[in-house]
Amino acid sequence: MIELILLERVEKLGQMGQLVKVKPGFARNYLLPQKKALRATKENLAYFETQRAQLEATNLQRKSEATEIAATLEGLTVVLVRQAGESGQLYGSVSARDIAEAVTEAGFTIEKRQVVLERPIKTLGMHPVRIVLHPEVSVMVTANVAQSAEEAAMQARGIDPQRLADEDEEELEEQRAALAPAAPAEAGAR
C-alpha cells in the first residue's frame, strides 16, 4: 500500500488534503498521472500545506462553474439512433463516448471520462446516465436510444414503439384469422 495526499475529492476514496492508503497500481496508473494526488513525503506534505489555500480556492471556483453548467444540463435528453433486432436488443452497445458526443452536439462540451455508465446500454429505450462535471457535482441526463428519429419522439412521449409494433402484428393476425374461415365458405357457395 502506498500513502498519498489527495489534491481533490476522489469519489469513494476521500476529500482534498486527506492522507489515504491505496494499492500501488491505482496510485501509479490513475491518481498520480491525473494529478489527483501526491506521494505522502515530508516535502510534499509541506508543499501541500503552502498550496492548500490556492488549491481550495481553485476547487471552489471549478465547483461553482460546474454547478452553473449542471443547472442548464439537468433534464437534458439526447437521442442516439442505433440498429437493433426485433426484440429491441442493440447490435452493439452505446458507449460513454457516444453519449459524450451527443451531449457535446447538444451544446455542452464534456469528455467521455465524465460519463458514468453503471452498465453498458444494450437495449432500445430511455436510459438515465450520470455526468460528473466536478468531483462534487454530477447531473443526470437521459439517453433516448431508438432505431429512428420517429421512434425516439414516440419514446419521449412515453409510447413504447416495440410494444406498439407487437400489438399491430397481433391485430393483423386476428384480422387474418377472422377472414380465413369466411373465404372458404364463400368459395363453396358458388
Image: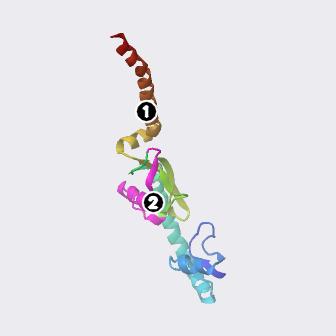
Most extreme residue toward the bottom is: 43
Q: Say which of marks 2 and 1 sits in front.
A: 1
Instruction: Name the residue type under label 1.
Output: Glu
Res. 98 image quadrant: bottom left
Tag 1 or tag 2, which sits nearer the N-term? 2
Q: Residue 8: where, in percent of width, then height?
A: 56, 72
**Residue 2 located within the stretch drawn in magenta:** no
- Residue 100: mark: none
Q: Quadrant of the C terminus?
A: top left
The residue under label 1 is 169
Residue 165 position (above or below residue 139): above
Res. 135 in view? yes
Between residue 41 and residue 166, name the one nearer to us: 166
Q: Quadrant of the N terminus?
A: bottom right
- Residue 95: mark: 2
Bin the neighbour count of mark 2 within 10 Å (Cα to Cα): few under 14, some 14-19, many 20 and up. Answer: some
Instruction: Name the residue type under label 2.
Output: Ser
Callout 2 touching callout 1 (CB < 8 Å): no
Between residue 100 and residue 64, name the one nearer to us: 100
Q: Residue 35: where, in percent of width, then height?
A: 51, 77
Residue drawn at x 44%, y 44% as measured from the top left: 86
Q: Residue 179: where, in percent of width, then height?
A: 40, 20
Residue drawn at x 51%, y 57% as measured from the top left: 120
Q: Bounds of the magenta span?
A: 86-113
Query: For numbered disc 1, what is the local secondary structure?
Result: helix
